[in-house]
Image (tube, grey):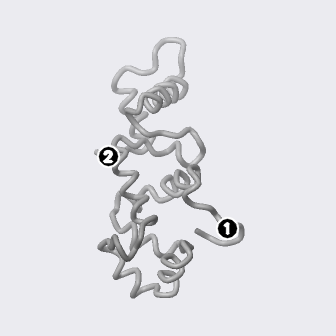
């Protein structure tokens, strides 16, 4: 398992005896996740959409980002050909000017794990300045 949704981590925490007396489950869970993140054991951010994703293997997060940020000529990936054929104009826009259109994600993030975490992944990339939303236009 490379990542878990927060609700599943919450369920595991309950099974393991959290919360301790005097603390709510949310307070103790958030403190635990923040602590494990500070130690580098997991990746978890407390911001809105990013908080719903607990990354146990940071390589998974890097793999997702690499699907979108790379030299497409030097590092082709399996979904590239399908994306190029299905959305030629958007593909050219991505490769030439780094403009990502939402429709390309179904090809570039064909891996179900990435697709299922789309909002959290996009929010994480935006948090780190790797992606910028353009007002009035979908990603």
Residue drawn at (29%, 73%) of the image = 78
- Residue 38 % position (x, y): 47, 29
Residue 83, placed above or below residue 4: below
Secondary structure at badge 1 equals loop
Secondary structure at badge 2 equals loop
- Residue 12 % position (x, y): 36, 32
Figure quadrant of the N terminus? top left
Going by the picture, which residue comes out furthest to the top? 21
Which of the marked residues, 1 or 2, is nearer the chain's N terminus? 2
Residue 69, placed above or below residue 121: below
Which of the pair 130/87 is nearer the observer?
130
Residue drawn at (33%, 43%) of the image = 57
Going by the picture, which residue comes out furthest to the front? 74
Locate residue 58: give its quadrant: top left
Residue drawn at (45%, 66%) of the image = 68
Q: Residues within 10 Å of mark 1 (few under 14, many from 20)?
A: few
Q: Residues within 10 Å of mark 2 (few under 14, many from 20)?
A: few
Which of the pair 76/118 is nearer the observer?
76
Residue drawn at (34%, 62%) of the image = 112
- Residue 63 % position (x, y): 36, 57
Residue 69, placed above or below residue 59: below
Figure quadrant of the C terminus? bottom right
Q: Give the left or right position of residue 51, taking residue 13 as reference.
A: right
Q: Give the left or right position of residue 71, taking residue 100 as reference.
A: left
User: Which disc is residue 99 wearing?
Assistant: none
Going by the picture, which residue comes out furthest to the right? 136
**Dot 2 corresponds to which residue?**
2
Q: CA distance from mark 1 to mark 2?
A: 30 Å
- Residue 136 % position (x, y): 71, 71
User: Which disc is residue 134 wearing?
Assistant: 1
Which of the pair 115/40 is nearer the observer?
40
């Amino acid at each position: 398992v490379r990542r878990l949704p927060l609700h599943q981590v919450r369920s595991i925490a309950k099974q393991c005896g959290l919360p301790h007396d005097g603390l709510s489950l949310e307070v103790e869970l958030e403190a635990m996740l923040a602590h494990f993140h500070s130690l580098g054991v997991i990746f978890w951010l407390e911001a809105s959409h990013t908080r719903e994703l607990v990354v146990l293997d940071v390589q998974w997060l890097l793999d997702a980002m690499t699907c979108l940020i790379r030299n497409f000529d030097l590092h082709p990936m399996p979904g590239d050909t399908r994306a190029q054929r299905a959305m030629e104009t958007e593909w050219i826009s991505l490769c030439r000017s780094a403009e990502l259109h939402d429709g390309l994600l179904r090809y570039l993030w064909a891996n179900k794990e990435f697709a299922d975490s789309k909002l959290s992944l996009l929010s994480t990339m935006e948090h780190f300045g790797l992606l910028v939303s353009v007002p009035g236009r979908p990603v």
